[in-house]
């Protein structure tokens, strides 16, 4: 379940800091990272982005024409939380971001069975490197999926630059969606069938999520469509019912599929049952931490851990933080 952020993305983030006059060595010290970095595990990448953001007072990490002051993302999240549905949330997000009048124009339109969230460069405005596009699309799509229950799906993604050397990482970043490079603009296609989903998060919860960004956005997230989604929903339903993680035989019986058939079909989708189960457990823990006042011990029990210490160790391995630190963290 570990996610590794490619060295190219790490270098692109540091390039933004250097371009704004920051000392990269000082940023690495602030992030608690060694003096020479390459690819990073997701929690360490989060520490790096947080250090760059706070050093520059710029949530866009120095990658666009003007800085976006710390706190702007939380204001947008709070604004988006007042939408009724996922589609309306995307409309609010596109309008808010377009009003910032920075390096991109943002728009939303329907096309066939999809809702297209698009971003195009403003002529003459600085876009330092591809991370400016990657971060916007990942952060927006993950945040809005979380707004409707931490399930998302993308039918397509396209980019206005040639395929980068780390293009293989886009599979995880964009839910295994079909990719196109060298296009006139960049964006993602959201299934219209999902756009009717209701927004579940309150303004307070949304603002807290945004303050933790990019932590939540770069947690592992996979198995979000088709059979993997059906399996994830079934696991979550059974886990929520009695606090016990179901084995694959029980899930196969629940779905009316033979266990060997379920294993084979998941393998065909590039997904392992144990990973889906771990993801559901992690997602439930995050949700309970951020939307309830339940004690850590209670959350451990509700997510199938035999004792709180085992839950705390697992949660630190997922996020780089203890559950209590995660609950109060502000990024």
Image (cartoon, helix red, strand yellow):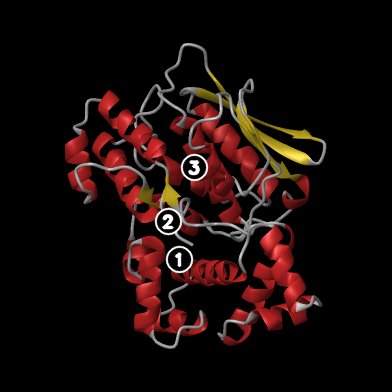
Residue 80 visible somewhere in the drawing? no
Query: How many residues crowd mark 1 within 10 Å: few (<14), some (14–19), many (20+)?
Result: some
Residue 118 picture quarter:
top right
Dot 1 lies on which element? helix
Query: Which residue shows up at 51% across the image and 55% down it?
Result: 203
Residue lying farthest to the top in this orientation: 124
Residue 28 visible somewhere in the drawing? yes
Query: Which residue shows up at 53% across the image and 70% down it?
Result: 278
Q: Position of residue 152 (x, y in %)?
A: 64, 53
Query: Which residue shows up at 37% across the image and 66% down it?
Result: 317
- Mark 1 to mark 3 CA distance (whole Å): 18 Å
Q: Mark 2 highlights which residue?
A: 208
Dot 3 lies on which element? helix
The mark tally for this picture is 3
Q: Is residue 63 left or right of residue 121?
A: left
Contact between labelled residues 3 and 2, with CB atoms less than 8 Å apart: no
Residue 88 picture quarter:
top right
Query: Which residue shows up at 26% across the image and 28% down it?
Result: 18
Query: How many residues crowd mark 3 within 10 Å: few (<14), some (14–19), many (20+)?
Result: some
Q: Is residue 119 above or below residue 151?
A: above
Q: Position of residue 9 (x, y in %)?
A: 41, 37
Q: Mark 1 highlights which residue?
A: 290
Closer to the chain start, of discs 1 and 3, is: 3
Contact between labelled residues 1 and 2, with CB atoms less than 8 Å apart: yes
Closer to the chain start, of discs 2 and 1, is: 2
Closer to the chain start, of discs 2 and 3, is: 3
Q: Mark 3 highlights which residue?
A: 76
Query: How many residues crowd mark 2 within 10 Å: few (<14), some (14–19), many (20+)?
Result: many
């Amino acid at each position: 379940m570990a996610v590794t952020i490619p060295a190219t993305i790490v270098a692109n983030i540091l390039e933004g800091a250097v371009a704004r006059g920051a000392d990269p060595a000082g940023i690495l010290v602030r992030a608690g990272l060694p003096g020479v970095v390459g690819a990073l595990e997701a929690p360490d990448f989060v520490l790096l982005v947080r250090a760059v953001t706070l050093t520059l007072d710029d949530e866009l990490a120095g990658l666009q024409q003007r800085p976006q002051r710390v706190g702007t993302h939380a204001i947008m999240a709070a604004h988006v939380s007042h939408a009724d549905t996922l589609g309306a949330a995307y409309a609010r997000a596109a309008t808010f971001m377009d009003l910032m009048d920075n390096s991109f124009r943002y728009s939303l339109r329907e096309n066939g069975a999809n809702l297209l969230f698009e971003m195009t460069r403003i002529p003459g405005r600085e876009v330092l490197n591809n991370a400016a596009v990657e971060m916007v699309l990942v952060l927006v799509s993950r945040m809005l999926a979380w707004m409707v229950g931490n399930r998302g799906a993308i039918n397509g993604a396209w980019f206005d630059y040639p395929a980068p050397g780390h293009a293989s990482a886009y599979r995880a970043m964009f839910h295994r969606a079909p990719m196109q490079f060298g296009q006139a603009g960049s964006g993602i296609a959201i299934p219209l069938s999902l756009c009717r989903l209701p927004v579940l998060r309150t303004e307070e919860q949304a603002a807290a999520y945004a303050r933790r960004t990019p932590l939540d956005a770069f947690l592992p997230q996979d198995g979000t469509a088709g059979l993997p989604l059906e399996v994830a929903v079934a696991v979550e339903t059974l886990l929520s019912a009695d606090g016990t993680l179901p084995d694959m035989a029980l899930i196969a019986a629940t779905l009316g599929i033979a266990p060997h058939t379920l294993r084979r079909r998941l393998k065909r989708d590039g997904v392992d049952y144990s990973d889906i189960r771990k993801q559901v457990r992690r997602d439930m823990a995050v949700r309970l931490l951020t939307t309830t006042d339940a004690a850590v011990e209670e959350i451990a029990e509700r997510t199938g851990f035999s004792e709180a210490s085992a839950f705390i160790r697992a949660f630190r391995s997922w996020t780089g933080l203890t559950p209590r630190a995660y609950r109060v963290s502000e990024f």
